Each structure stands twice: as C-alpha cells, then as structure tokens.
Amino acid sequence: MVQANERFWRRQARRLARRAGFGFWFARWAPATAVAVGVAAPVLLLSRRSGASAAFGYGLLGAIALLAVGAAVLTRRARLRERDGLVWLEARLGLHNRLSAAAEGVGEWPDPDRYAPVFAWRGLRGATPVAFGAALLAAAALVPLTTPVAEATLPVETPVSWRQTDEWIKSLKEAQVTQPESLQAFEERLDRLRAEPARRWYGENGLEAADSLRDQLRSEVRSLATDLDSAADALEGGSGAGAPADTDRRRLDAAARGLSSRSLRLRSDLLQKLRDAGKAPNGLPPAESGSLARALRENAGFCRMSLRECREGDTDCLRVAARRPGRGGVERGPGPAPLTLDPEASKQEPGRLEGVSNPDMRQAALGDVVETTIGPHRVSPAPRGVTAGGRAAAGAGGEAVSKGTLTPEERRILARYFQ
Amino acid sequence: MTAAHASRAEVDEAAAHLARLRSALSDVLLGQDALLDLVVIGILSRGHLLLEGLPGLGKTTLVKALGKALGLVVRRIQFTPDLLPGDITGNPVLQEQDGRRTFVFHPGPLFGNLVLADEINRASPKTQSALLEAMQEQRATVLGEEHALPDPFFVLATQNPIELEGTYPLPEAQLDRFLFKLDVPRNPVAVLERIVSERAIGRDPEVPVVLSADALVRLIDVAGRVFVPKVVAAYIARLVDATHPGQSAAAGGVRYGASPRAALALAAGARSRALLEGRLNASFEDVKALAPAVLQHRLGLDYAARLSGQTPAAVVAALLDEVAPHDRPLPASLEGAPR
C-alpha cells in the first residue's frame, strides 16, 4: 500500500513535469514556428506554381524540426524534475511538503485520496498563431492551381544515318557474312555517337560523323559484295576447264586479298575455303567449286539485301528483303509495309485495297494501291486525265507539273514539314 | 546535525504538550494567539526574543505566565541608562569566613531560565554587551571568571517604539542574536472588553504548570530533530540570499542583508512550528509564516529607503512575494500556476 502510494505520487509528479516541460517547449517553439509557417505559406504557393513543392515541403519540415530542437535546447534548464513535480503538487494540495519529506525517507506518503487534479491546460500560449499559420499553409498547399503543364519531352528521333548503319550491322550479323570483330568496330563507333548528348546529334559534326560512318559501312559492304561476286565469277569461270585459267586465278587471288584485308572481313571459314581454292594447282572439284561459288553469291546477296540494293532479277534478294519485318509508311523500317505485293501468294481478297511497295521506284510510286475485284471490267469511257504520279501538264519552257496522290499519313507529314 | 529525525510518536506527544501550553498562555494573554504561537516557537527553538510594543500590552504578563507554565525561574531586569553590567551578571562580594576574607560571587538577575530584559534599549552599550555574551555563550564573565547560566536560558527583551530620546539603539550584532523580533499588537475592542471583564489591576492571573524545565528541554530536542526537506532548506537559502542588495528587486533599499544566522533561525523556527502543528517536517508555509519575525530586525535599510518610508517589514513582505518557494516555475499555460 505504501509503495502504491509512492508510485502514485511519483507518477503524478513525473506527469506534471512532462506537461510543464512541454508547456515551456511549446511556448518557445510556437512563436517562431508561427512566423516560419506564415512566411512559408506564400512561398509554398509560389513553389507550387513552379513545380518545386515537394522540395519546399521537405525544407519546411526540416526548418520546423530545427526550430523544435532549438526550443528544446533553450528550455532544457527550465524543465522540471520529479522532485519539482512533487513540490508543486504538495504546494497546491496543501500537503506541507509531505511529499518531499517522504521522497527523502521521512514520514509516509499521503493517501492518494487526497489528490485532486490541480493543474490543467489554460490554453497553450502561441497555439492560436501556430494554428492560424498551419491553416494558411494548408490553404497554400491545397488550393487548386492552374499549374502550367510542363512541355512533354518527346523522344528525340535518332539521325537517319544511325538507323541505317544500325540496320545494316544487324542484317550483316544475322546473315553471318563477316567476321564479328570487324562488325564490332563499326558498332563501337556507332555507340560512341549515341553516347553524345542528344543536342549534338544533329549538329554539323554529329551528322557528318554519322554520315561518314554510314557511308564507310555502305562502301565496305558494297566492296565485300563485289569481291564476293568477283570470286564467285572466278570460280565459275574455272569450273568448266578443270584447271582455273590464269585470269580466273588472278581474280580469285585479288578477291581473296580484298576480302581478307578490308575493314569488313569475310567470314573466316569462307575465306579459308577461298584461299584453299586459289592455292589448289588444279582447282577445286567442280561440285565443290560450284558449292563455294553459290555460297559466295548468296553472301553477296545478303550484303546487297542488307543495303536494300537488290539487283534486278535477283529474286533471292528480293524475296529475303520482302520478308524482313517492317512497319511500312514513310517511317517504315526495313521491309515492306503490311499488305504489300509479295512475290509469294498473298491473302488477297476481293474488294480489299492494298498499298504497293516496290524498291524499283520507276514501277511504283508512293500512294499506289492495288485492288482486286470479282466482276466485269469497269472501263471509264472518259479519258483519265491526270494520274497519280504522272505528269499533269507539259508546262512551258521546260516546266513540268506533277501530281501525286498521298496517303493521309503522308499528307500530314508533308504538311508538318512545310509548316 | 541531529542523529535521527523525530518520530511520529515523539511529534504527537510534543504537539499535545504544546497544545496545553498554548491553551494556558492564551488564557492569560487574551487575543494574542499569533504572538503566543511565535513565542512558543521561539522557546522551542532555543531562541531569544525581542518584543516590541507600547507599554501595557501584556509583555511582562506574557513572560511571567510563560515562566510559570514551563516551571522556569523567571528574572526581570529593568534596563536603565545607569545600569551596570555587574547589576545584571552579579558581583563578587567580599565575605569573611573563618577569619579569612574571600570574594564570593553573587549571581545577578541574569541567572534565571527566563530573563525579561525590560526596555533593553535604555541600557548603555556596555551593559547591553554583557547581555550579548549571555545570550550567545550562555555564560557570564565577571572579573575574568566565567559563570555558566542555567539551562534552558532565554532572554525575552522588550523595546518601546516611542520615547526613543536618551536610548541606546541595539547594535546590529546584538539584534542578530535575537531569534525573533515580535511586534506586540494593540488589542481589538472585543479583546479589550474581555480584558476589562476578566482581569483586574494588581492581580496576576492564575497559570497552571503544564511542563517542567526537563520536559521543555526534551521538547526542544524533539523540535531540533524535525526534518527539513531539501526543497525547504533551498527556499530558506534563496530567501536569505535575496535580502542582500542586488540579489532581488525587493532588496533595492537594503543596506545590508540577513546573515547565515538568520537562515539557521528560519530553519529552527520552521522546525518548531511544524512540531507545534504536529508535523514531521518543516514546510514552505512555516518559512513564510516566520520570515517576517526572523528577518525584519536583521535588515538595515539605506537612508533613501528610510526617508521614503520603507520599513523592513515591507521589504520582507516584498521578498516573500518575489522569491518563490519553487526553484523551477511552471509554464503559464498550466492552470494553477502563478502567472
């Protein structure tokens, strides 16, 4: 019982001490915080308009926390201890310092029945300004603003020459025409260009470097294809006579030297076979020679196919090129647009209108479509006049007027271009 | 320091004795309960008291009644300007015994348990200093020979605040020896009516003996063992310190403040008051109640303060307002705390 009394009074004293400590702390903290919050409210509004409200919020929280710590430091001497709490309680309750004496071991702790709450908050000093400031801050934080929409950062389109270079490299990799190391050198150069800041991509230097890389790769691929064709010709030329003629052997040697000394070197196994064929005094057996020539031509085709430079009549190249995936349209990637003419049978249906894709621009123009119908021919008796892609008028003095039909997408792009 | 604090049983027994003493005294000195309490507290504190009041207010009656109630030897000395130290301490007298002449010391009126020094300020400083030694050392020195005074020994001196012409104001050192300076107030009409009804000139009222001298000494011992909590001791220290110039606003007109003896007197008085009220420990209330009696005669005011009508009692009252018992205040936001 005695211990219970002691616990009760000590608990009450500590509680009072805590409340007093909070009161002192709040009295210090509140005015400064009220001022800070009051100043912060308009600043918050401005920062919201500029889109930096999150950073501002963290800053404000930090400032308030700093003020709280400062107030705690300044009021640490005024903080009450348990002993002080006991003194205040016994003074208010008329206990004639019985609690202090009991705490020092003299006399008994009074009965808790004598306790009545004698301290209550009178109203925290400074609470009103803080509440007002907080309300201002809340209003500043919540009031709807017409925030200017930040301009969307559109992805920067990479230069065309990059895309072409990248596309050729990928094609060559897939075809496995060249040695991987020789392609890697071009890839690294392309990566270096990509690593440049986007604002430099379209600078004079950037474009020049990109075009140079593309042109160099194209030149290398073309040379590779030419050498491969030349080697195939040499092999085919010597295949009928049993032993290769001197001319064919020289062409073969020259092609082999070229294929091994360029920046873009031929695949190792083919190159080795080519060298072996050149060194064989009597040439390769016809079957082996023919097989090697076909392999060389096929690889030459791959090279041209990568550059989309199929020869006329090179159906293999055309077929492969047609199969390559793409999106079609002006921004098409490699390959035909969907629903294009294909050397193979398509899923043509009557009444379906399809765009025409043809690498040979003399045969097909942009916007050309083809439709198949079932029924009798409809022939307009009237002359057609101007046709799409054709010549509209002869003009005078060398002037010519052409008229083309564009797809809606192409029309939009052209309009954007001229704007 | 005392060996052990007073126990509950000791305190209860002492409080009962003291209640009887107060009752006996209040039957003699009508309407002066507060003064009686302070006198009893002073006695319990082994203190000497300085009573100041107009003639005829019952000062001598009080001392006589106190002596009778406590079974003490009471002596009365009327101080006059021609009073010599030997008149109060006693003198060696030449006596012839068996044909030989020797000096035999004849104790003076100082040799009593309760000495009433009436109108002490009328004696010369030389005589006052003889009393000073007796009050401080509880002994008298005559012709180089020391004579112990009886135990207990109390001096209750009186002073008349009027007719100061031809008097010798007590020096500060001697004032400091008095535990309390008590003002004997004028009686209100109702009390005067009782006095007229119940008293007659020339007839001392009957006073029962409620305590013996030995019992009083035991009570004094118990009072000395009443516990003074640290917070109360701290309050006394701060209060006494605040009496000095520059230590508080209230002490602005003070020329010199109270001595450590004043702090001891406050503590002793607080102990005795707690015992009188049957408590085991002294409290802030005890200190506040006794501060005027303990401090007012120990403060010296400067010329400007005296000229402006300031009194030591007013200074003490201001000090009590200024110096809070709690060394750590509560925030103003807590109800119940002083603003």
Image (spheres, coloured by chain):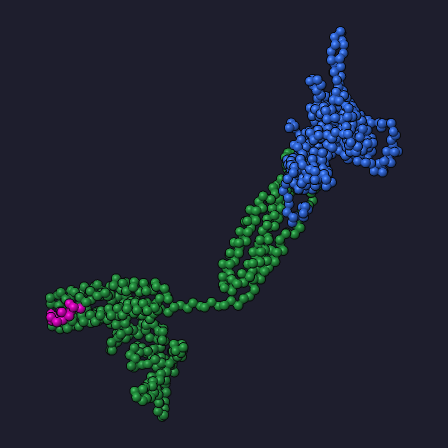
Magenta segment's dominant SS is helix
As drawn, the residue found furthest toward the bottom would be A381
Residue B239, can we see it?
Answer: no
Q: Check the image and report above or below for A40 versus A402.
A: above
Q: How many marks?
A: 0
Q: Quadrant of the N terminus of chain B?
A: top right
Q: Which residues are magenta?
A: A243-255
Give the left or right position of residue A381, taking residue A180 as reference: right
Give how far across and how far down residue A330 sits, in percent. Answer: 36, 75
As drawn, B62 above or below A333 = above
User: Which residue is nearer to you in this view: A60 or B202?
Assistant: B202
Return the x and y of residue A347 as percentages of the image width and height: 35, 78
Q: Position of residue B121 (x, y in %)?
A: 76, 29
For image coordinates 74% across by 10% down, the residue present is: B101
For residue B269, what is the image quadrant? Answer: top right
Give the residue at x 45% y 68%.
A151
Colour representing chain B: blue
Left or right: residue A87 compared with residue A33: right
**Looking at the image, can residue A76 be seen?**
yes
Tell which of A144 and B105 is nearer to you. B105
**Between A14 and A333, the one nearer to me in the picture:** A14
* Picture layout, residue B35 above or below residue A320: above
Q: Is residue A367 left or right of residue A105?
A: left
Residue B200 appears in which quarter of the rendering? top right
Chain corresponding to green in the figure? A
User: Is residue A296 magenta-colored?
Assistant: no
